Image (cartoon, grey):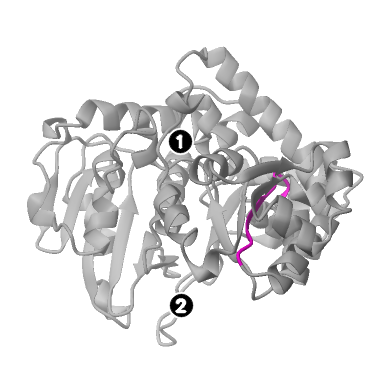
Amino acid sequence: MTDKMKRRIIFEDLQTKRQSKLGRIIVLTGARQTGKTTSARHCFADYAYLTADDLVQRSNLLKLTASQWHAAYPRAVLDEVQKEPALIDCIKAAHDQLDGTRYVLSGSSQFLLMEKVKESLAGRCTIMEIYPLTLPELATRCLDDALAPSFFAQYVTGERDTDGIYPSFTLDARHAAKKAAYDHYLSYGGYPALTDEELTDEERDEWLRMYVRTFLERDVRDLAAIRDLEPFMKLQRYLAHTTGDLANYSSIAKETGVSVPTVQRYVRYMEISYQSVALPAWFANPLKKLVKAPKIHLLDNGVLRTILQKKGAPTGNEFESAIAAEIYKQIKAYKLPLTCYHLRTQDGREVDVLLEAADHYIAIEIKMAEHVNHADARHLHDLQSILNKPVRHSFILSNDVQAHHLTDNITAMHAAAFLC
């Protein structure tokens, strides 16, 4: 029900795009169950709603000419449109031949949808991605709640600086809501369906198990036409067990029993299906011995824990992935002008997340610890000797409720205070 919906960052973008000349055709893509249909119907409530899930309706829609589309459905949301790709050609014809038509296309199988979109709608559409809920979105109660940007987003845009950080996260007026969102995220991830307060923990676990099964049985088959899913399932489990590690494709091939090219292809499938994100290594300095392998993080902590069949506290790598994934999602959701890397030297010095802006970097170390000290900042000192632009600031994100200004340029704070 809409009164239980969380407010989404993308709503404002969608409302702006619907008034723009560039918004005549909007394509919403993202993982299954991230809220594409809900967002489209909320932000385009005055548009006709059509679904290709209905066999009779989609058959009749295919018979419409461009002028009939303009007359009957000049503005419409077309859901599950990948089930009848020929409908995209109908939308293209209506767009090209008649002014005033505006359409929103969405689908739960983004592979087939995007393949046809790139073929038919190149240069005609705006593509917008919807990810699982971010922490600021999880902290809202309903659609009418104000959606305050995270400290991270405000810091990047210059709206806040480190001088305004509370000495303790517990002093934040919204501490309870932010902590509840954070705890939910670490246990169940960010899929909107799981925020329903009427669900039991057992029902959330069951939903996640079905989600993982549906991803394998539908999305992977759609994308790769893989008949034998066992090798892909082995890779999925391997990536879950090694989340946050450097990607060694030879080792993965050995463990999963497939070739290195197949591993690379499967890893790419995980990325384009919004199940994982590969942080590339930063190695722009040719004078330094730097590791060049990417780090692979699973994108949703609830899915990660389900694949591992795990309860209880996360490991350090799992916590790192949860925080790195949240940073990545917020960069996408807020459209922050940052590129995401990790940094590791061959002698073991590393930065978990290195964010590059036009004229500076932001370095982030992720620690699961409940108490942070100066030793935790050892990799963040003197980064300027490696990097080619100044470091604006470095942060240590942890479970320590106390904020620590370790140096003028290094601040430790609770991960939820930074990201919520």
Q: Which residue is mark 1?
A: 315
Is residue 86 rendered to the left or right of residue 277? Answer: right
Is residue 213 rendered to the left or right of residue 33? Answer: right
State the residue lying farthest toward the bottom. Answer: 287
The percent position of residue 323, horizontal first and vertical second, equals: 40, 46
Q: Secondary structure at mark 2?
A: loop
Within 10 Å of disc 1 (Cα), the crowding (few <14, some 14-19, many 20+) is: few
In which image quadrant can residue 282 be found? bottom left
Labelled pair 2, 1 in contact (Cβ < 8 Å): no
Q: Is residue 384 magenta?
A: no
| First to last magenta residue range | 100-109
In which image quadrant can residue 134 be found? top left
Q: Is residue 108 magenta?
A: yes
Q: What residue is drawn where x is 24% and y is 25%?
A: 176
The percent position of residue 132, horizontal first and vertical second, equals: 51, 42
Q: What residue is drawn where x is 74% and y is 61%?
A: 91
State the residue lying farthest toward the right. Answer: 227
Q: Is residue 185 above or below residue 336?
A: above
Residue 349 appears in the figure = no
**Where's the C terminus, which quadrant?**
top left
Q: Which residue is mark 2?
A: 283
First reached walking from the N terminus: tag 2 or tag 1:
2
Q: Is residue 159 above or below residue 208?
A: below
Residue 217 appears in the figure = yes
